[in-house]
Image (cartoon, rainbow, N blue to C red):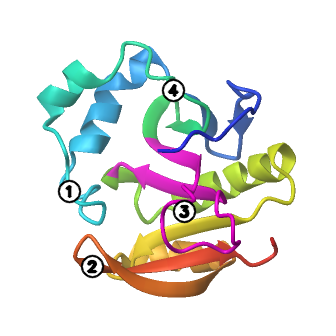
Amino acid sequence: MKPLGAVPWPPTPIVTERLTLRETRTEDRPALAELLSSEIVQAYLGGPQHTREQLEELIPVDPNTRPGIFAVERDGEFIGRITVQRRDPAWAHHVRDEGDEVEIGCEFLPTTWGAGVANEAVRAVLGWIDATLPGEPVVLTTQVANERSLRLARRLGFVEVERFTAYGAEQWFGHLEDRP
């Protein structure tokens, strides 16, 4: 992940109707390990890179290691995360010549799927991006086969820029329509 840059961090928690978005904390480690080791969650992200046991050892005691990783909490429990980073200029697929766009991604525990949680959380973070990095283009990449993610991207206002093959699968690259 390419660092987001000089932004105020940790942010004031963002509170929505059902969620709190905040920096990650020590108490998030077990659920974060579950999220990152889940075959279901990681299916369209190349699969888990480590077992849950390995992640419990690898995740720092203070997992709030860099700006741009929002823990998503519902009823006091960690249920997922949203990452905001700069898209590395060395990578292909950009919406501006110099690259370095703001890229957003999310991962949620399967128990939350289908309840509108990702939509609510990503909208809240898009509001944070608007306030913190005004005018910056926002992009998103997902596998075409990840129908849930693709539907969410379109619902949020992302429009397709192009498709490409990476990691052995067709990818969908889009940008937020009302941004540069």
Q: Which residue is mark 2?
A: 169
Q: Position of residue 171 (x, y in %)?
A: 39, 78
* Mark 2 vs mark 1: in front: 2
Q: Which residue is mark 4?
A: 24
Mark 4 or mark 1: name the one nearer the start of the chain: 4
Q: Nearer the viewer, mark 4 or mark 1?
A: 1
Which of pointers 2 and 4 indicates the residue nearer the eye? 2
Q: Is residue 100 magenta?
A: yes
Asked whether 117 falls inside the magenta stretch, the response is: no
> In this image, 81 relative to 110: left or right?
right
Identify the amino acid type marked 1. Answer: Gly
Quadrant including the C terminus: bottom right
Real-space Cα distance between discs 2 and 1? 13 Å
Residue 148 % position (x, y): 42, 74
Highlighted magenta segment, given as a residue range: 80-109
Indicate the amino acid at tag 4.
Thr
How far apart in space, not on screen, are marks 2 and 4 (Cα)?
Answer: 31 Å
Is residue 117 among the parts visible in the rendering? no
Q: Earlier in the sequence, mark 2 or mark 4?
A: 4
Left/right placement of residue 77 relative to residue 138 reads: left
**Residue carrying label 1:** 47
- Where is residue 142 drawn, in percent x and y? 43, 71
